[in-house]
Image (cartoon, rainbow, N blue to C red):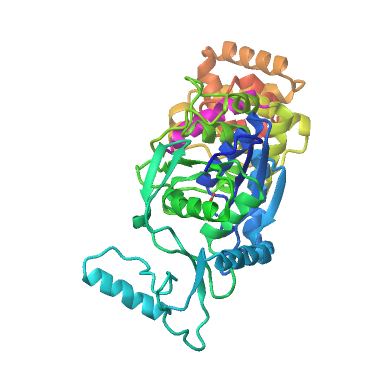
Amino acid sequence: MSSISTPVRTRIAPSPTGFLHLGTARTALYSWAYARHFGGEFVLRIEDTDVARSTQDSVEQILQSMRWLGLDADEGPIYQMERLERYQVVVAQLIREGKAYHCYATPEELDAMREAQRARGEKTGYDGRWRPEPGKVLPAVPEGVKPVVRFRNPLDGEVTWNDLVKGPITINNREIDDLIIMRTDGVPTYNFAVVVDDWDMRISHVFRGDEHVNNTPWQINIFNALGAPLPQFGHVPVILGDDGLKLSKRRGAVSVTAYEDGGYLPEAMLNYLARLGWSHGDEELFTREQLVSWFDGTHLSKSPAQWDAAKLEWVNGQYMKQADDARLAGLVAAQLGKRGLSVSSRDKLQAMCALFKDRCATTVVLADWLAIFVADVAPLAEDLTTHVTEAVKPALAALADKFAGIDWNKTAIQAAIKETIAAHGLKMPQLAIPARVLVCGRAQTPSVDAVLELFDKEIVIKRLRSA
Ligand code: GLU
């Protein structure tokens, strides 16, 4: 069967049983970038046939995460549960053509079948008891048993495809059995619905996680049975956690939402996720536009990618440095809001972001810093002992007095500090560090005059006098 080459249409097909997983987000990103690179289209399909586990809440979360990452779909969301009739029509056609059949075996019977196979040391799988063959007499249809529909998989031959990521893959049909394509309640199974959809939606390239490699031979056989053109498949290796095990909920954050809440910037997340399992030379930092212009489906890694929280932080930190201050002010205001804090002047908040963003990996860390301006600070006991010594206390009190009489701006603040260190025979750090500890609750900050200027003068004086 030949592969279609144009037009490029890709899709992401999440199951709405939770948040958008990082692995799915990365596959979505590759599918999106591939479509954008070739001027094609990107479709969003919601695979909600697992009715018991699918929720609208999860759909909303997935859509929100896609929006946040900027993965705009040209079509969808298309819900599989709204397409039941279509799957039923296709199933009926396959049954008519002898390519699918009803199977009345009960779950208990199938358990017994597998048990017997295991006892004989055989591979377990459906034994074809309801599979029609020329001349074969099928069992009598039992009463009161609703049948499932099974696909009549070819018994011989091989399924081969040239995987966009893994290269050529061949599976012998003897390895796979007649899978259920429709359950007793008329709802299709994943492997069938996915084929009908990819066909109907004219999907040309399927990127997905490599946990689906074993499903692909069945899907290819179903495409062929339907006389549908085959898309090309690219199976992207899993993402491993820091500990080398598959990234999972138990081992840290795996949802896109967690990173949004955790103060990461979407462009950094996009950059990091894209680079995780794909490369363009040595480029570590790239824009969305560069990604689109470079991403042509090549240079996807064949081996699993390792999640590296420290690298993600570094990438985010790079984007924080470049981020527009007004935008950061909006993001950090939301973070502060979660703590019941706010900075009354947006201009001031923006100036604070400008001063602190260089040292902050995330907007959460930035909010930690900016909280010093609007919430009480609690200097560490050891900082107080080391820096706020008896010897320096008179100078701190004198500085507070001087501050009381000046206009509150950086130049005047700097002059007051200089006068105070001269009068007390101190060096700059001997006064600046204890002043930071008292006012900011930290011994290290950006330039002291620039930081103090952003405080209310009264707060600075009060904290200096608390020594
Ligand atoms: N609903 C499937 C999943 O979330 C989609 C797999 C596919 O892309 O074919 O794993």
**Residue 333 point in image, percent of width and height:** 70, 40
Question: Where residue 243 sits in the image (x, y, percent)?
Answer: 35, 43
Name the spot of residue 102 as percent of width and height, x first. Answer: 50, 73
| Number of on-image labels | 0
- In-front residue for pair 19/126: 126
Between 93 and 24, the residue placed more toward the observer is: 93
Q: Residue 36: tell me if it is visible.
A: yes
Give me the residue at 55% from left, 68% from top: 95
User: Residue at the spot x=54%, y=46% of the render?
Assistant: 24
Residue 113 sits above or below residue 3 on the image: below
Q: Quadrant of the C terminus?
A: top right
Q: Is residue 318 magenta?
A: yes
- Would residue 19 be seen by someone viewing this image from the given angle? no
Whether the magenta-drawn stretch holds residue 199 is answered as no
Magenta residues?
306-323
Q: Nearer the viewer, residue 18 or 448?
A: 18
Nearer the observer, 235 or 251? 235
Q: Is residue 213 left or right of residue 411?
A: left
74 up-or-down from 290: above or below: below
Q: In the picture provided, is 459 more to the left or to the right than 344?
A: left
Residue located 51% across and 66% down the image = 100
Dominant SS in magenta: helix
Q: Is residue 433 left or right of residue 167?
A: right
Outermost residue, front side: 135
Say if 408 sits above or below 157 in the image: above
Residue furthest to the bottom: 143
Point out residue 329 in the picture as x, y percentages from the top left corner: 71, 34
In this rendering, the answer to whether 227 lies above or below 244 is below
307 to the left or right of 192: left
